[in-house]
Amino acid sequence: MPEPAEIVRGTLDLLILRAVSWGPVHGYAVARWIAEATSDTLSIEEGTLYPALHRLHEKGLIDAEWGLSENNRRARYYTLTTAGRRHLRQQAASFTRYARAIFAALDAPANPRPREA
Amino acid sequence: MPHAEPRWRRYLRFHGADVSADVDDELRFHLDSLEADLRAQGFTDAEARREAARRFGSMAAMRERLRRQDTRRSHREARTAWWRDAAQDARYAARSLAQRPAFTLAIIVVLALGVGATTAMFSAVDAALLRPLPFAHPDQLLELRDVSIPMGADFSPGVPANQPHVPDISDAAQMRDHFSHVAAYASGGLNLSDPENPQRVRVGVVTRDFFATLGVPPERGRTFSVAEGAPNGPAAVILSHDIWQRQYGGRDMTGALIQLNGTSYTVVGIMPRGFSFPGESELWIPLSVPLTFQTFEPFRGYLPSTVIARLRDGTTAAAANARLSAMWTRALAPIAATTDGRYAAQRLATIHAQGATTPLRDTLVGDRARALLVLLGATGLLLLIACANVTNLLLSRAAWRRREIAVRGVLGATRSRLVRQLLTESVLLSVVGTAFGVALAPLVLHLVGALMPAHLAGVASAHVDVRVLAFAAALALLTGVGFGLWPALGAAHANAGATIKDGGAHGATEGAASRTRRALVTAELALTIVLLIGSGLMLRSFLRLTSTSAGLDAEHVGTLELAFPQVARARATHLRTISAMLDRMRSVRGIDAVGAVNDLPLSQEGGIGLQVTVDGAPPPPPDEPRFARYLVTSGGYFRAMGIPLVSGRVFTAADDSLAPKVVIVNATMAQRYWPGQSALGRTIHFGGDTVPVTVIGIVGDVRQASLDEAPEPQMFFSIHDQTPDHVALVARGTLDGHALLARMTQAVHSVDRAQAVFHVRTMDDVLSTSIAPRRTNTLLISLFGVLALVLAALGVYAVVSYGVTQRHRELGIRSALGATSADLVTLVAREMTWVVTLGVVIGLVAAWLLTRLLASQLYDVTVHDPAIFVLAALALILPAAAATLVPALRATRVDPATVMKAE
């Protein structure tokens, strides 16, 4: 992808919150979900996921807890906090509005006709 | 290949989060999972590793970034958790303290007393010794010992011409490489004329450089000009902010004239609020160099001055001191070496021993520093006793709570958490105790007031301020942790399993705890003995002092003071006024005797010393002249004041300035200057005077300056001959004090309505004011001693009482096996006998070593007064015995049947 950084940065938090919203998941699962859900369109460097996860944790939007993975390895599991759920709802709504507006603009005719008197 | 976490790292996690290890683990897990998935998709091991690393991006940078981020977060969480725990601990502590109100109250009262006393004494010491004086760079200010101001040519004779030239203020002013400023000041009182409210004001008489030396500029106007500071210069005055507001309503006064003792002074400036040095001055007038008679006269010729200097930047007090000492040596050493040079040698020795300069603060604080420090030390001991007591109470309580603590331990509270919980309790106690103590402090401070050095009045006053509060807060924390730590550690040590099983009555640490308790009580007793002996010595000194006769009979005597405008021609008028006033007083029913004197006894004013020549006696060594204190009285003064006439007669109205000169001397003067013979009819001379003065009477010695100073030679002149412009009228009668003073004031005003009257008081008040500092000192240290005694007795009681409760079962069994009551009491009281004996012995030894510090405070009592040591030991042993026996007797009431049934 040419220059996705700006867009990804803003939306990555949103995607992570969404990934975490179904229950405890570890970082690797979050990365896999994002890749699958976006059909690999947004395949980012997976490492950049972690600063985002930890930042969200620091902000209190997600909780972190050590647990055992499917293959009995110690893994860090993330869950959504109440604040995180509220944040996800608001951000999802506002992003949807934003995206709709962009789409609408992109679909609009080239030259708006001048208003008839 | 999956990465295995090293085993040791897991152990680290038992002690909280390990941020780096967690970050490594999380990233490792991601990579391992990714590699595993890739292998499942058919990658070889090596390809999978390479592909995973590619997709992940820079591992090292990521790890560093996460570590930093997580460390920040974990610190913040730890802080939050700490405060949450602290709040929880505080709530828990408050609840558990509230459950035992008597216990809690006892501790708070004990602490409040200890902290209150210590805080008050600290504020006094802080004001007197610690806080910088309110001048610019106060550490640069020095007093120049023994340096005087030269006297002008117009001054009265009396200074022999062949005196050596000793350093004076002009010499000091020449020391420009050492001193940037040199100044002198003196204090006195003048009458401020005001049509409605004639009043006496405190005046600072200061040289022109005085304000510049202190580094305090005026708030308005200017300080004295060169002309005003010169001999016989224009009369100028500077007002204090206070009198400017009070008397003149803060209106513009620059250039206004005010009347002091009948002379007009021009107001040139106003000093800023709060500045009243020296001695709570209300206004300042110039002191000229050299001194002139004009300066002296309004102050009845008595104006002792102090010379001060400010060190130049970069010079030291030691250098200035060395330079001045050298000047003194040059001036006095040649005379000191001669056979007649004893006085000069003595003067020089003092300079060498004590230094030619003293820090200004030391001069102002004077000898009160020791008294204040001794009392601060006494309160420190009291606080230690209070803390020992509280520790003791907490220890007994910790024993009772062992079960609760063990249960909490089993439920997962860590030791450090438990210690913290218990410390929170004790800190909470000490904070509350301190709060009450600080509330109590101003009361104690009020008592301490009389002890504050008089020279510091208006310079540094003692009050509870931020510094004192900080001191109290530090005390609270220290005492809280100090008395709480030991019980807390002990309690948290308790063996949980054993404690829960046997119901908390006995524990593994019981032996150690009771040893600690006994040690604490021993220390308390020893400290108490020290305080008691200190109080005893002070009390005995005080009793000795109050039983010392001042040489007069103060009962039923009233006095008031008057000052007349300073106009030499009006002396005859003054005498008529005084006589009229005395006649009016004498005619009052209930007044038996009246008199007048220029300086009241015991009012800190010793009167001026004059050099006398005793006719017919061999001349004294030239540098050891004969001096006598000079006083002026009416004939009735001696009877009114109750001073016995030993022989001869008193003055009559005929002894006026036209009659032959006569004098009355005191017994000391008679014995010292006419040893072995009668002084009556002998004559003396003053200075260059040729007129002989005949001794007509000898009166008993009076302690003129203060009760603890031995009488000096005194001579009395007739008021009809030398009328002073300041007198104290004295009346003795059957009226009670209040009525007597009212009648006296009425009598004065019936002669002259406008006469300013001040210091209206009974002679008993004068006497009691003169010993006020000593009384306060004694009162406070005795108060601390009694408090210590009460606390120590409480401590003994608590330990014995606790012992009886602990050994309840044992006592029951012994009783069942036939032990008598006496056996049981002996059993319980035995260990306390040792504790008390040891405490008393240690205390006596400590007191023996420490009472030296009190030496300067004592009067006519030695620091090792055996009676006081014995009495103090008895005063402690008796209450300790009572505090032991009362709970011990409870041991005899243990019912064996109940004890057996309880098993």
Image (spheres, coloured by chain):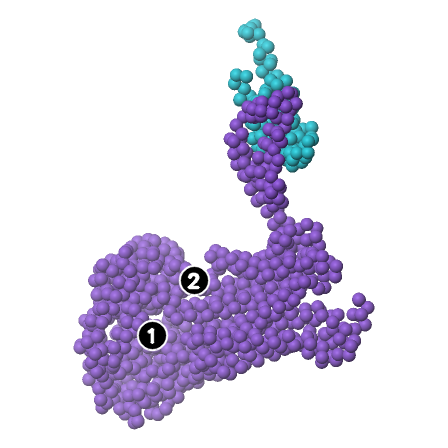
Q: CA distance from mark 2 to mark 1?
A: 35 Å
Q: Chain ID for label 2? A: B
Looking at numbered disc 1 in the image, what kind of residue is underneath it? Answer: His
Q: Colour of chain B?
A: purple
> Which sits earlier in the primary sequence, circle 2 or circle 1?
2
Q: Give residue B563's position: percent from left, percent from top.
A: 34, 72
Locate the N terminus of chain B by quadrant.
Answer: top right
Say which quarter of the image contains residue B795.
bottom right
Q: Is residue B866 above or below residue B72?
A: below
Asked if one can make out residue B98 in the rendered structure from this viewpoint, the answer is no
Q: Colour of chain A?
A: cyan
Residue at horizontal 43%, vertical 62%?
A: B127
Q: Chain ID for label 1? A: B
Say the numbered circle drawn on residue B127.
2
Q: Give residue B431's position: percent from left, percent from top.
A: 57, 57
Q: Is residue B358 above or below residue B63?
A: below
Residue at horizontal 34%, vertical 77%?
A: B606
Residue at horizontal 45%, vertical 68%?
A: B373
Q: Residue furthest bottom?
A: B677
Looking at numbered disc 2 in the image, what kind of residue is underneath it? Answer: Ala
Residue bearing the label numbered 1:
B726
